[in-house]
C-alpha cells in the first residue's frame, strides 16, 4: 500500500522537523518526507492540508484488562480506543489475571494485539512473580518474548533486600525497571492527597511523603545497582525535583506523568465524585504546577494516559469503596492539546513528550517521523474540536472529561502505513 | 476547559430549601438558624402528654444503619414517630451486606418499598452524597453520619445546645478536644460554628489526632489543653476510640488522659459558667472524668434531648423541600410539549 499525504504541517520532535511537507508511505514505512521517491505511484492520497502530521503517539501505560478483567476491557476494545486517541504504540502494565509474569501471558497479549491490529503493544512484565515482591519473575524469558521493561506496579517488595536483588538482576541484562514509587504503609487506606480537601471530606490522606520516601529509597537502590530505571506516574512536585536531582547526578533515570495529573487537582474531589478516584492521588495545585514545569523542562520525558477502564459497578459506590482509575486513552491527543491551549506547553514540546520522549525512555522502536521509520503517524486538525464521549470505544466510560469540548481532533491514525483509525 | 463544573448544591431544591441533609457545607446562616428555631418549637412538643404532631403522617422513614449506633438511631426513630411517620429501622451491618448485597442494591430495594426518607449511617465518607446523587434522588436522604466526613444533625444539636445555654454564638470561645482526625462530629461542629458567626474556634489535641489544614475551618490549633481551655465558654469533648492505640497514634489511654482528659482542675481554666458537651458515648476516665461528666457544668444529657427536636426539625424541613421539588419537577415535565 502506497499512500501520499498531502500538505500537512509535519512535526517530528526527534529531528526537530516542523514544516509543511508531503509524506510518502510505502510498505509500512515512511518512504520520504518532502519529495516523492522516484517512480512513486500513490494508491491513495490523503488531503492533509490544514492538518498536523506527527509520529503516532506512544503511551507508556494503557491497562488492556486482558487476560482476566474482560468486564473492564479487552485488548481489541482498548487498543481500538487508543488508535482513536492518536496512539500507535503502547505499553500495558503487568496487572492482569494471571499476572504478566510468564512468557505464556505475554504471548497471549501480543497475539491478540496483533490480531486486533489497532496498535503496537509492548508489554511491561512483572518484576516479581505474581507481583508479590518475593521471588523474581523470569525476566530474560519475558524479554525474549517481547516485554520491554519490568515493574511491580504499586505493589511493594517484601523488603529492600529483595528489591535490591531484583534491580541487580535486571541490571545484569540491561533491562529497564519501571517504578511506581509509593510507600505502602504511608499510603495505607489512603484515598486522597493529604491536604485541605481530604481533611474537609474526611477521606484518609496519602501524604506527599508516601511518594518521596519511596522515591528516595528507589533512587538510592537504582544508583547502587546501576540499573536503567523509569519512574512512572509521578504525582508530586517534590518527586519531580528528586528525579531532576538524580538526572543531574548522572543517573540513567527517566519519568512519566499521567496526563490527568497535569490537568486536575484534588479540588476535583469536592463532590465525592468517584471518577476522580485515582492512585497515586490527584494532589495540590502546587504539585500540578511543579509537574507541568518538569514536563516542560524535560525532567519528565513522557506523558502517558495511565488508562484504566472500569465497568460501571466499579465506580458505583461511596468514594472509598470504588476502584481507582480513569479511562482516557482515546482522548489522549485532544486532552493533551488542552495544555497547549492553556499555554502550559508549546506544541512541539507536547508532541515530544507524547512520542519521542516515551519511546526513548523504554527504548521502543517508535516515536519518529523520518524516512525509513515505520509509518506510524497521527494526522490531526488543530483548529477543530472534540466533544469527549460523543463516540466512545473503550469499554470503560469512567472518564470525568466526558461531555467536555476539547481542542483538536484526530482525523487519521496510521499504523505501519495503513489507516488504523479514521474519524 | 474546566473539568470541574460547579453544580447546584445537591441538598437544596430549586428554591433553596433543604431536600436532603447531607452536610453543613454550603448551608447559609439563615438556614441553620431556621433549623434551630424549628427545633426550639419542637422541644415544647416533647414536654406534652401527647408528644405527637402530624407533619409526616402517612410518610415512611427508613433508618438504614450500616454502622452500629444506639443514641443516633433511637433519637431519629423518636423524632420520626413524634412527627407521626411510619418508621422502619434496619441494621444493615448485620443483614444484607454480609450476604454480598451492595449499598446501591440495598437502598434501591428500600426505595421500591416506597420509603419517603432515608436516614443513613455508613462508614464511608461521602456515602450519603452517593445515595442522594446516584441511588435515589427523589427520596429525602438524611446523613446520620458518614465516615469521618459529617454528622450534620449532631452538629446542629450541638448548636442548639450552645444557643440555649449561651444565648448565641457571636462572642463565644469554643474548644473542641481530642480525636478530631477521625471525628465527623468535630467537622460538622466547626462548619456550623463558623457559619453561625462564632469568632473563636479552638481545636486541642496531639498532631497525630488532628487533620491537616484546620485553618480552613477558621480554627486555631492548640496542643496544650490548659492553654487551649483558658477562658472558653464551651468545651466539646470527643470520644476516643480504643483502636487509636494501634498504629502509633497514641502511646496509651493513660497518657492521653493525662494530657488531654478533662477533669475538674482543668475545667476551672475555662470560664466559670462554661458548659461541657460530648456527643457520646462517653469513656469515663479516658477523655473525661466522671465528676465533670456528671457535674453541674455538663449538658451532655441535654444534648440527647435536644437531639430529638433537631432531628424532628431536619426531617420535617427536608420532607417538605423534597415534596416541593417533586411537585416542581412534575409540573415542569407536564408543561413540556409532547
Image: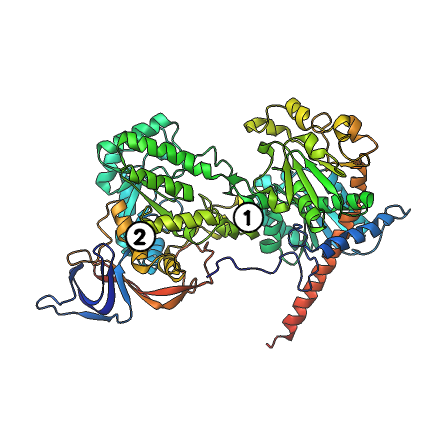
Mark identifier at residue A301 = none
- Provide residue B20's location: percent of width, then percent of height: 67, 54
Give the number of marks: 2
Circle 1 residue: A317
Label drawn at residue A353: 2
Q: Is residue A149 above or below residue B136?
A: above
Under tag 1, what secondary structure? loop
Q: Is residue B200 left or right of residue A17?
A: right
Q: Where residue B256 sits: x, y (%)?
A: 65, 26
Left or right for A325, reference A301: right
Quick one: A372 or B61, which is closer to the camera? A372
Q: Quadrant of residue A213?
A: top left
Query: Residue B11: percent from the left, percent from the top?
Result: 65, 56
Q: What quarter of the picture does the N terminus of chain A occupy?
A: bottom left
Query: Which of the two marks, 1 or 2, is nearer to us in this view?
Result: 2
| Residue B257 appears in the figure | yes
1 or 2: tag closer to the N-terminus: 1
Please tell me if label 1 and label 2 are on a single chain. yes
**Above or below: residue A8 compared with residue B154:** below
Q: Chain of mark 1?
A: A
Q: Work out which residue is located at the far left of the displayed protein and give it.
A: A38
Give whichever of B155, A350 is nearer the camera: A350
Q: Residue at x 18, y 58 (%)?
A: A370
Front residue (pair B309, A339): A339
Q: Secondary structure at mark 2?
A: helix
Mark 2 belongs to chain: A
- List x then y, in percent, for residue A154: 40, 38
Instruction: Identify the image quadrant of residue B270.
Output: top right
Amino acid at each position: 500500500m502506497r499512500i501520499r499525504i498531502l500538505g500537512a504541517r509535519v512535526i517530528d520532535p526527534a529531528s526537530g522537523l516542523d514544516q509543511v511537507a508531503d509524506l510518502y508511505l510505502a510498505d509500512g514505512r515512511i518512504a520520504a518526507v518532502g519529495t516523492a521517491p522516484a517512480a512513486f505511484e500513490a494508491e491513495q492520497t490523503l488531503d492533509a492540508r490544514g492538518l498536523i502530521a506527527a509520529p503516532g503517539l506512544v503511551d507508556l501505560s494503557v491497562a488492556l484488562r486482558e487476560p482476566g478483567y474482560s468486564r473492564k476491557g479487552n485488548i481489541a476494545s482498548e487498543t481500538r480506543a487508543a488508535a482513536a486517541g492518536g496512539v500507535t504504540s503502547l505499553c500495558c502494565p503487568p496487572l492482569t489475571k494471571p499476572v504478566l509474569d510468564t512468557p505464556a501471558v505475554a504471548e497471549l497479549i501480543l497475539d491478540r494485539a496483533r490480531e486486533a491490529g489497532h496498535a503496537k503493544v509492548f508489554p511491561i512484565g512483572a518484576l516479581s512473580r505474581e507481583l508479590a515482591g518475593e521471588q523474581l519473575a523470569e525476566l530474560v524469558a519475558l524479554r525474549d518474548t517481547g516485554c520491554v521493561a519490568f515493574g511491580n506496579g504499586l505493589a511493594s517488595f517484601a523488603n529492600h533486600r529483595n528489591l535490591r536483588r531484583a534491580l541487580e538482576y535486571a541490571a545484569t541484562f540491561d533491562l529497564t525497571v519501571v517504578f511506581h514509587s509509593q510507600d505502602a504503609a504511608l499510603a495505607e487506606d489512603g484515598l486522597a492527597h493529604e491536604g485541605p480537601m481530604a481533611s474537609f471530606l474526611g477521606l484518609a490522606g496519602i501524604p506527599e511523603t508516601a511518594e518521596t520516601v519511596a522515591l528516595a529509597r528507589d533512587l538510592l537502590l537504582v544508583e547502587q545497582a546501576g540499573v536503567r530505571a523509569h519512574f512512572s506516574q509521578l504525582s508530586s512536585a517534590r518527586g519531580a525535583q528528586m528525579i531532576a536531582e538524580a538526572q543531574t547526578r548522572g543517573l540513567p533515570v527517566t519519568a512519566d506523568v499521567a496526563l490527568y495529573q497535569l490537568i486536575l487537582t484534588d479540588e476535583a474531589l469536592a463532590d465525592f465524585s468517584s471518577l476522580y478516584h485515582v492512585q497515586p492521588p490527584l494532589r495540590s495545585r502546587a504539585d500540578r504546577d511543579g509537574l507541568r514545569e518538569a514536563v516542560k523542562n524535560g525532567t519528565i520525558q513522557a506523558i502517558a494516559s495511565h488508562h484504566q477502564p472500569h465497568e460501571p459497578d466499579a465506580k458505583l459506590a461511596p468514594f472509598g469503596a470504588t476502584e481507582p482509575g480513569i479511562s482516557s486513552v482515546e482522548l489522549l491527543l485532544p486532552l493533551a492539546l488542552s495544555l497547549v491551549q492553556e499555554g502550559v506547553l508549546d506544541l512541539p514540546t507536547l508532541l515530544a513528550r507524547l512520542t519521542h520522549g516515551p519511546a526513548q525512555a523504554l527504548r521502543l522502536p517508535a516515536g519518529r517521523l523520518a524516512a525509513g521509520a515505520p509509518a506510524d503517524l497521527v494526522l490531526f486538525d488543530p483548529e477543530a474540536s472534540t466533544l469527549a464521549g460523543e463516540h466512545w470505544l473503550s469499554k470503560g466510560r469512567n472518564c470525568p472529561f466526558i461531555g467536555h469540548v476539547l481542542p483538536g481532533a484526530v482525523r487519521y491514525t496510521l499504523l505501519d502505513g495503513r489507516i488504523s483509525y479514521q474519524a | 476547559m474546566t473539568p470541574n463544573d460547579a453544580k447546584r448544591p445537591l441538598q437544596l431544591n430549586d428554591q433553596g430549601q433543604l431536600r436532603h441533609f447531607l452536610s453543613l457545607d454550603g448551608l447559609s446562616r439563615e438556614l441553620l438558624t431556621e433549623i434551630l428555631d424549628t427545633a426550639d418549637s419542637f422541644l415544647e412538643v416533647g414536654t406534652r402528654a401527647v408528644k405527637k404532631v402530624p407533619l409526616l403522617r402517612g410518610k415512611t422513614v427508613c433508618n438504614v444503619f450500616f454502622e452500629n449506633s444506639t443514641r443516633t438511631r433511637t433519637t431519629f426513630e423518636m423524632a420520626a414517630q413524634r412527627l407521626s411517620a411510619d418508621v422502619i429501622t434496619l441494621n444493615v451491618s448485620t443483614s444484607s451486606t454480609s450476604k454480598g448485597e451492595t449499598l446501591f442494591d440495598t437502598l434501591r430495594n428500600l426505595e421500591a418499598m416506597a420509603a419517603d426518607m432515608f436516614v443513613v449511617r455508613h462508614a464511608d465518607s461521602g456515602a450519603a452524597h452517593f445515595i442522594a446523587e446516584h441511588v435515589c434522588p427523589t427520596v429525602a436522604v438524611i446523613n446520620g453520619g458518614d465516615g469521618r466526613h459529617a454528622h450534620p444533625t449532631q452538629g446542629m444539636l450541638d448548636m442548639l445546645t450552645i444557643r440555649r445555654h449561651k444565648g448565641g454564638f457571636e462572642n463565644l470561645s469554643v474548644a473542641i478536644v481530642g480525636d478530631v482526625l477521625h471525628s465527623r462530629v468535630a467537622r460538622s461542629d466547626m462548619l456550623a460554628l463558623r457559619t453561625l458567626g462564632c469568632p473563636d474556634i479552638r481545636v486541642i489535641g496531639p498532631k497525630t489526632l488532628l487533620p491537616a489544614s484546620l485553618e480552613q475551618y477558621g480554627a486555631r490549633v492548640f496542643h496544650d489543653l490548659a492553654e487551649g481551655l483558658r477562658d472558653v465558654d464551651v468545651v466539646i469533648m470527643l470520644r476516643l476510640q480504643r483502636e487509636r492505640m494501634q498504629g502509633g497514634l497514641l502511646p496509651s489511654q493513660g497518657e492521653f488522659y493525662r494530657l488531654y482528659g478533662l477533669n475538674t482542675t482543668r475545667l476551672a481554666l475555662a470560664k466559670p459558667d462554661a458548659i461541657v458537651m460530648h456527643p457520646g458515648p462517653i469513656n469515663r476516665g479516658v477523655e473525661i472524668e466522671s465528676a465533670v461528666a456528671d457535674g453541674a457544668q455538663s449538658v451532655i444529657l441535654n444534648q440527647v434531648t435536644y437531639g430529638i427536636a433537631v432531628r424532628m426539625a431536619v426531617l420535617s424541613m427536608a420532607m417538605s423541600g423534597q415534596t416541593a421539588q417533586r411537585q416542581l419537577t412534575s409540573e415542569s415535565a407536564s408543561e413540556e410539549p409532547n
